[in-house]
Amino acid sequence: MPNVSRAGLPTAVTALLEENVSARGDLSVIFARPQAGEENACTEPVIRTVQMPGRFLYAYTYGRRLRQMSTAATSIIGIVVDDRLALLDRPYRVLQPAEVSALPDSTALLASGPCPACGQSLPSTSSEATLLDTGGSVTVLHSLVEVPAYFTAPDGTMIWAAGGSGGTGTPSPVVPETVSQGNKKFLFMRVRFADDNQSYEPSSDSQVQGDLNTVMRRFAEMSYGTLQGSYGFTPTMTLPKPRSGYMNGWSDVDGMTALLNDAKAQAAAIAADPAFPGVPYPFHPTNYSLFAVRWNGEPGGCCSYGGGGNAWIRWDGASVLIHE
């Protein structure tokens, strides 16, 4: 129900309605890959979440938004019930006349400058302009016909916002780098849990180094040299929680996010720990743009996961790293 339609309703009624959301937030799109033989056990192959200041939501969408990958500070427009967000399939919504009339600053918006789409002067009255909710803010265009082109990139895609070491040894010619091109630094973090045997390692140095060398080589080959990378992999680190501590709400902030953040914190501690003077590559997360955390077994069910520059890996092999 639009906000303007709620104005005269009693609080007891509005408290039962869905919440309209218009803001900027970080959309994470996480893809699951089941282990061989467990394909039918993977009930949720794609997990979408949205994080805004003080909020974590599971997102569900449709249409063009289904092709949107993880995006920071993207337009979030939709409706919320409990912790579930139905996300509009566009980064904008055309405001209705009643909504425009309710804006406290529509006159100031019209006087703010030329139309950002065509460069012409904006109309003098809001009834002649097109006002858009663009996620936490209002954008004014000269006319409705300019809206699709304004949110479409030249290639036709929708504009949503915005323990060792190694690497390819060749710099990328792409400067400045993009999400999928340039020179990337990848941190691979092996972990054990607080209730594991302290000698347990999920994967050997030789296995990790071989997998990562393959990944870096394949990325360089498939990108025709425009994606180059270097990597560091940590010793096996002990997380502060037992396995069960990450299994309550695996796909939310208490599960996947907490495990990744705890691994980063342990890696940062190793980078500053004099007990590791021979570490050839500093492990502080600020030195990296891509991250993977590696363990065996639970938590995680049947799958490994990846999205938004992060990966959660539960078995060996370059193929699962390339996929995630």
Image (cartoon, rainbow, N blue to C red):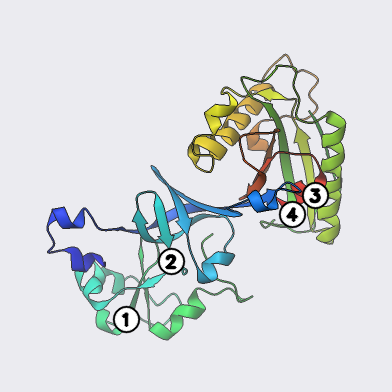
Q: Mark 1 vs mark 2: which is more N-terminal?
A: 2
Quadrant of the image containing the N terminus: bottom left
Residue at 80% across, 51% down:
228
User: Which element carries disc 2, helix, strand or loop?
Assistant: loop
| Front-most of residues 273 and 301 | 301
Front position in the image: 125 or 103: 103
Nearer to us of marks 1 and 3 is: 3
Residue visible at 68% across and 33% down in the picture: 297
Q: Amino acid at mark 2?
A: Leu
Q: Residues within 10 Å of mark 1 (few under 14, many from 20)?
A: some
Cα distance between the residues tagged 1 and 4: 41 Å
Residue 36 location in percent, x, y?
Answer: 76, 48
* Location of mark 3 (residue): 319
User: Disc 2 marks which residue?
Assistant: 88
With 16 as the anchor, is 79 left or right in this view?
Answer: right
CB under 8 Å between callouts 1 and 2?
Answer: no
